[in-house]
Image: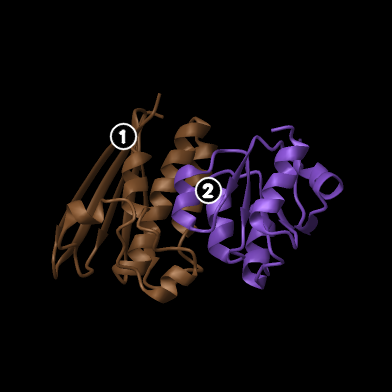
Chain colours: A brown, B purple
């Protein structure tokens, strides 16, 4: 593709039936664009974890995806409570999810680690009381 | 081994039918992010979680199918979403370990 493609999604807060719509849509869009299946899978998984986090922790948020010849960039922003201790939040198994969320199978404390694991670049900026921005990039080819 | 062989070879019931797919491996567990992080493409996923999020994870992670164990129920929203997304769902009364073992034996693992 000669020009980059921009996609935007809004994730509602606390709606676990709808969380996943953005990643499902992105997955089918990237497949249609002919991106390699392995990269599409990594991107879909990373974005789904991000969507779930937005729904669980932030009361919802925004996702902006930019697709070009070399990479897929996903920027997730929210105006949620922020993350007081980012290194702690990045530890596998650390979770602040509620019992209700855990009963759905979430809250294993693997969301952020999975996002980092499945992307080539992962950055998280957060201010308590202001919100969080996560930037993820997956290289293509 | 294909998903279409599961009823005859392992005794699993079809809850949501779909396209016949090769099964490449097995993932067993109920925590969704663990499945997201560790299940491989083409795995049959053994779990007791029958909600819409399980279907989303199976679809995004390209699992071959979901096998609901211990007679766990697939809720109606999840069933509908699975049909829409082409996610095959099977059911068994076997516990997760025994169901996984039945497939592993059938696959010669």
View extreme (right): residue? B8
The dot on residue B89 is: none
Would residue A21 be visible to someone looking at this image?
yes
Q: CA distance from mark 2 to mark 1?
A: 18 Å
Q: What subunit carries mark 2?
A: B
How crowded pointer 1 is (Cα within 10 Å; few <14, some 14-19, many 20+) is rated as few
Q: Is residue A10 above or below residue B20?
A: below
Residue at x 34% of width, y 28% of height = A70
Along the line of sight, the residue nearer the viewer: A17 or B72: B72
Residue A55 position, x and y percent, is: 37, 67
**Image check: B84 left or right of A96?**
right
Question: Which residue is located at x 25 percent, y 46 percent?
Answer: A135
Vertically, is A102 above or below A109? below
Give the side of residue A70 with respect to residue A48, left or right: left
Which type of secondary structure does the marked residue at label 2 adopt? Answer: helix
Residue position marked by numbered label 2 in the rendering: B60
Checking the image for residue A120, the label placed there is 1
Q: Is residue A2 above or below residue A91?
A: above
Q: Quadrant of the C terminus of chain B?
A: top right
Q: Is residue B69 left or right of residue A15?
A: right
């Amino acid at each position: 593709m000669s020009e980059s493609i921009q996609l935007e999604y809004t994730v509602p807060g606390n709606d676990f039936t709808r969380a996943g719509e953005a990643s499902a849509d992105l997955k089918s869009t990237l497949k249609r664009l002919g991106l390699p299946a392995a990269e599409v899978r990594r991107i879909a998984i990373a974005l789904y974890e991000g969507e779930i986090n937005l729904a669980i922790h932030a009361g919802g948020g925004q996702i902006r995806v930019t697709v070009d010849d070399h990479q897929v960039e996903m920027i997730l922003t929210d105006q949620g409570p922020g993350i007081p201790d980012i290194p702690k939040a990045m530890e596998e198994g650390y979770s602040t999810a509620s019992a209700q969320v855990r009963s759905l199978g979430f809250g294993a404390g693997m969301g952020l680690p999975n996002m980092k694991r499945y992307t080539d670049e992962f950055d998280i900026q957060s201010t308590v009381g202001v919100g969080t921005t996560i930037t993820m990039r997956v290289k293509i080819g | 081994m294909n998903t279409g062989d599961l009823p005859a070879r392992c005794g699993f019931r079809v809850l949501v039918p779909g396209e016949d797919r090769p099964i490449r491996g097995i993932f067993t567990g109920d925590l969704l992010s663990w499945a997201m992080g560790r299940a491989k493409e083409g795995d049959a996923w053994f779990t007791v979680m029958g909600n819409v999020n399980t279907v989303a994870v199976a679809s995004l992670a390209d699992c071959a199918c979901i096998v609901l164990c211990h007679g766990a129920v697939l809720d109606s929203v999840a069933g509908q979403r699975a049909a829409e997304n082409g996610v095959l769902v099977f059911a068994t009364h076997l516990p997760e370990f025994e169901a996984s073992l039945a497939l592993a034996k059938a696959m010669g693992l």
